[in-house]
Image (spheres, rainbow, N blue to C red):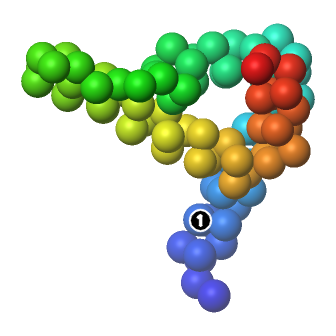
Amino acid sequence: MGDDDLGTENAEAIEIAEITEVLSNRTMRKVMFGVINDMGYFSEIFDIDPYANAYFTGRRAYSVELVDKLKEMAPDKFALMITENW
């Protein structure tokens, strides 16, 4: 294992710890849920206007990436966030 591998593993461990810390706070879980909701994760995003559709599709795509990351790195905290705010 090279130094680059250790740096990548360390960066990932730090990111997991940071996400877990953020989602450990009830207020931050509420804020994060609001961000995900505002980005259209739970909504139908289609719009007949192609520019609006592209905008909403881009926002939702980022929210899907964010949710995937939260689920992967802190699944128990993510489930708690959904339960508290749904």
Instruction: Name the quarter where the C terminus is drawn.
Output: top right
Give the vertical position of 39 relative to 16 (above or below): above
Look at 23% across and 20% down and name the residue there.
47
- Tell me the quarter of the picture where residue 10 sits: bottom right
- Could you say where residue 63 lies in the image, as x and y percent from the top left? 49, 33
The residue drawn where x is 16% and y is 19% is 48
Residue farthest along the left direction in this orientation: 50
Kindly indicate the quadrant of the structure image that contains residue 27: top right
Residue 81 pos. (x, y %): 80, 27
The answer to whether any part of residue 20 appears in the image is: no
Label 1 Cα crowd, 10 Å radius (few <14 / some 14-19 / many 20+): few
Depth check: 70 or 55 in front?
55
Seen in the picture, residue 38 relative to 56 is either above or below; the reply is above
- What SS does tag 1 mark? helix
1 in relation to 82, above or below: below
Using the image, determine if residue 62 lies above or below residue 44.
below
Residue 13 x, y percent position in the rendering: 74, 56
- Amino acid at the residue labelled 1: Thr
Q: Quadrant of residue 50?
A: top left
Q: Relative to residue 19, is residue 40 drawn left or right?
A: left
- Which residue sits at x=69%, y=13%? 31
> 81 and 20: which one is in front?
81
Q: Position of residue 84 (x, y in %)?
A: 86, 20
- The residue indicated by pointer 1 is 8
Residue 68 appears left or right of 30? left
38 left or right of 21 in image? left
- The outermost residue toward the bottom is 1
- The answer to whether residue 33 is seen in the rendering is yes
